[in-house]
Image: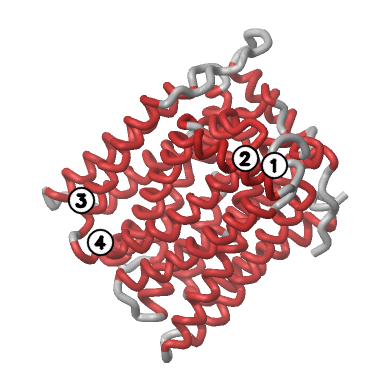
Amino acid sequence: MTVGSAPDSVGRAGGSGADGDGGAGAKSAAIRALLRDPNYLSIWVLGTLTGFIRWFQLLALGVYTFEITGSPLLVAIVPILWGLPLAICGPLIGGVADRVNRKLMLGASIAMILVVAITMASLAYAGSLTVTHIFVASVLSGLFWATDMPVRRRLLGDVAGSALATAMSFDAATNSATRMMGPLLGGVMLQLVGITGVFVLSSSVYAIGLVLIILARLPAPSMRVGQSALIHDLIAGIRFVLGNWELRRVLAVTIVFNVWGFPFTAMIPILGKERLGLDPFHVGLLSSLEGFGAFMGAMVVALYATPVHFPRIFLWGASLYLVMIFYLGVLSFVAGGPNHSFIAAALSLTVMGLAGACFATMQSTLTYLCAQPEYRSRVFGVLALCIGTGPIGFLNVGWMAESYGVPTALLAMSVEGLFAFLLLWIYGVLSR
């Protein structure tokens, strides 16, 4: 795939401050400044803790759902319900975030999900937990995650100042680390103490996150011009995105990745249990390797990426991810034999993690850089909407896996995604 050169606007936006000059000394200074800022640390650690619980729960709930139902489609419904609020509420939350105190909004969302986790722990302890409860909790968890882009990551960019790319890369790196540790510990805890322990730990972590956000001193909302209605603000934000070529490219690639790329992760528990015959611990280990690769990739991007390369990193990362899904589809046809199948799957997931980190890190960075300050929360809300197309992909891969088997589902979703990229390139969305 031919990738166009980095847009001048991105180069100019990233060309000032600590991240722009590309020097090792400036990078080091930016890192030191960020790690000394208690407000940045509060938002960063909050993202790390809640990210850990996200992947921790998704793996545990996926394995638990498969154990009690035996249905790949029902397993795929869990992440579908997590992503549904992004599609429904993303732009709305972005518009609201421009009008209220973002610290208060973030704190309220954490308090809500803390109550959900405590309730689920109580149901599990009483032996009353059903798939219906898991589905309801997944929707409410998705509502909490719908605030991450327009609220938490917007605040992260606001407190980072000129060290924006480094701040976003570190945030992506720690999120990737949670994708490594979350599934691993999710599998361990589910095997050792059951689903009750999963929600007890979730409650404890959310409580710590709530304390962090209460203690943080965060920027007040920026002054808005005029007093237009919320619906007018939402329309203005969408028009701004549609009129900006760089943002259109980011959002188009985001849709392709979330429909045909990321939903692959719902198949990892089934790939591990059905094709490789692994126990929950080893399924978690397999899932964690994708997060390990993502962590390493995000750290490399944080330390060495320069603004002129941001678009290329973004596009090639998403493309490589889809190619690796195709390879895993081929591999899963022969999986279940000697250990070479597990080793090949592990190495493939590590490479996928590297590619996914390139995509995820640049997704937030390019969105922030290409949006004017007064539009940023709304643009992040539109980005959340595009991420919210993920349920379409989860439903697609779940239905194909149920109907034709996991190997065929992986091959089909990879081919569909790469064909979508080809169309975007032909019609000038990926390069001018």
Q: Do labels 2 and 1 touch, CB within 8 Å?
A: yes
What residue is shown with label 3?
Answer: 129
Question: Gap in Å between the C-alphas at discs 4 and 1?
Answer: 42 Å
Quadrant including the N terminus: bottom right
Q: Do labels 3 and 1 touch, CB within 8 Å?
A: no
Please give the name of the residue rendered at 59% of the width and 47% of the height, measured from the top-left corner.
169
Sooner in the amino-acid sequence: mark 3 or mark 2: 2
What is the number of the mark on residue 30? 2
Mark nearest the camera among 3 and 1 is: 1
Please give the name of the residue rendered at 23% of the width and 52% of the height, measured from the top-left corner.
130
Please give the name of the residue rendered at 47% of the width and 63% of the height, measured from the top-left corner.
398
Vertical position of residue 80 compared to residue 335: above or below: above
Sooner in the amino-acid sequence: mark 4 or mark 1: 1
Q: Provide residue 109's location: percent of width, then percent of height.
A: 39, 30
Please give the name of the residue rendered at 62% of the width and 62% of the height, measured from the top-left corner.
355
What residue is shown with label 4?
Answer: 190
- SS under mark 1: loop
At label 1, the amino acid type is Asp
At label 2, the amino acid type is Ala
- SS under mark 2: helix
Q: In this view, does 226 lie to the left or right of 185?
A: right
Q: Is residue 21 visible?
A: yes
Sooner in the amino-acid sequence: mark 3 or mark 4: 3
Total numbered labels: 4
Mark nearest the camera among 2 and 4 is: 2
